[in-house]
Image: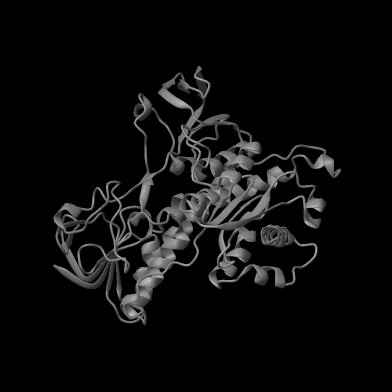
Amino acid sequence: MKEYDIIVIGAGAGTKLVTPPSKIGKRVAVFEKETPGGTCLNRGCIPSKMVIYPSELMRMAEGTEKYPVFFKEKPVADVTKIFKRVNEAVKSDSDSIPIAYEKNPNIDYYPKQVRFIAERILSDGEETYTAKHIFIVTGTRPNIPDIPGLKTTPFWTSREALSPDKFPKSLIIIGAGFISLELGAAYKAYGSDVIGLTRTDVLRTADGEIKKELNKHLPFPIESHYQIETVEFKDGLFFVTGWNDQGKKTTHSAELLLVATGIRPNTDDLGLEHTKIKTNVSGYIQVNDHLETTEPGIYAFGDVIGRYFFRHSANFEGEYLFDLLYGKKENQPIQYPPMPEAVFTHPQIASVGFTEEELLQKQIPYYKGVNPYSSSATGMARMSDSGFVKVLVSKETEQVLGAHIIGEEAANLIHQILLGMYLKAKLDDYLGMIYIHPAISEITRNAFRKVKEEKLKGAK
């Protein structure tokens, strides 16, 4: 049996527990059955944003007549070259990871599937391994719904959509979460005829006012509350049949079908039944406030624990574990700062903290300020006809409980509020600072002014 100080299962966010411990003399083994770098690098946030950004350049040329600015010709994207560049860049980054590990005498990289065969013993089918600390960072994969006919068709998941063998003239997307909205917006901008179908609301868990605004400005048509009956692939076309929200039976057809209906954890092939490690009913690994599983000495973090599904949250958890076990955390439980999220669709969306619906459900008193992009000097310059910043402030502490933005640069705008939440800033702190005029951040300031107005009205 090979013994290490650390074993890491998953070379995505798991890399946070590979190189840093090796630099302080720990012997580390890392196992990865797919390409190193994980979902984010290979099949998620990085390639998707590389695909999305050029599509945003395409969108900039739309509707410019109102300024008035005229383009003599419609922009044309060489989609084949775009995807080729994206995949070459991703492959280069991924290939560099094991090369770097090979140069480090304290790291052994195994491009293999590994499973537990006993409580603290792993096997790749040939050799066995154990370590003082074992970290499970195996992430998630697309969840494929049980729709009659679907699994016998050559449908896409996000993996194929980010590395297509051909660009479709038409595309049906099942699902309306962030993957659907991001990739659908990009494909639409590049010239594909896109339609989305979802059995729930679009962006189901978002703040209600965000969803309402998004539905007014969808990047491509989406039929919500659509119940799919069957999927068929015939003569080079997909046919999706179901009932719309009016109870009418319809059939949609397209060259390709993208299934983006959520994710499931990669825990069903780890041999967890040979350990004391427990999962919840959805298969996510249960951990305590120190990210330790129900098997002492074995930890899990990232998507596989089902708390947050962002690379930035997984990185935070990995850095916490390094400090806890090899640094100066001194057995402190993990304390998450405000956790932001963004959807890089069109229009862009960013959120942090509670939605208004959650505050109402929890009966937490709050002030609300909503300010449209158009009510600012930058909005006037951009002739904005959509988008807003919404802030929810505690009546008790006057600290921000939640913030939700839809519109241009939303993912950047949210950071000003995020920093304030991290520093426990109060309403007067946001209003006391000086904002550059006429920068886009004035939209945020004006939202806080609306909160102040609501507070003063309540005081009368």
Q: Position of residue 159 (x, y in %)?
A: 44, 44
What residue do we see at 58% from left, 54% from top? 350
Give the quadrant of residue 153.
top left
Say left or right for 40 vs 300.
Answer: right
Asked if residue 238 is positioned above or below residue 174 in the image, the reply reads above
Q: Residue furthest right?
A: 68
Q: Nearer the viewer, residue 135 or 361?
A: 361
Q: Residue furthest front?
A: 460
Q: Position of residue 72 (x, y in %)?
A: 82, 38
Viewer-proximal residue, 430 or 86? 430
Q: Is residue 277 visible?
A: yes
Q: Left of 243 or right of it: where is 71? A: right
Tell me the quarter of the image containing the C terminus: bottom right
Residue 360 x, y percent position in the rendering: 51, 50
Residue at 38%, 66% in the rendered image: 15
Q: Position of residue 447 (x, y in %)?
A: 69, 58
- For the image shown, how many numbered marks are present on the structure? 0
Q: Residue at x 47, y 21 (%)?
A: 243
Coloration mode:
one colour
Q: For the N terminus, which image quadrant?
A: bottom left
Q: Which residue is at the front of the view, 228 or 49?
A: 228
Nearest the eye: 360 or 250: 360
In the rendered view, would you say 83 is above or below 102? above
- On the question of residue 190 being in view, the answer is no
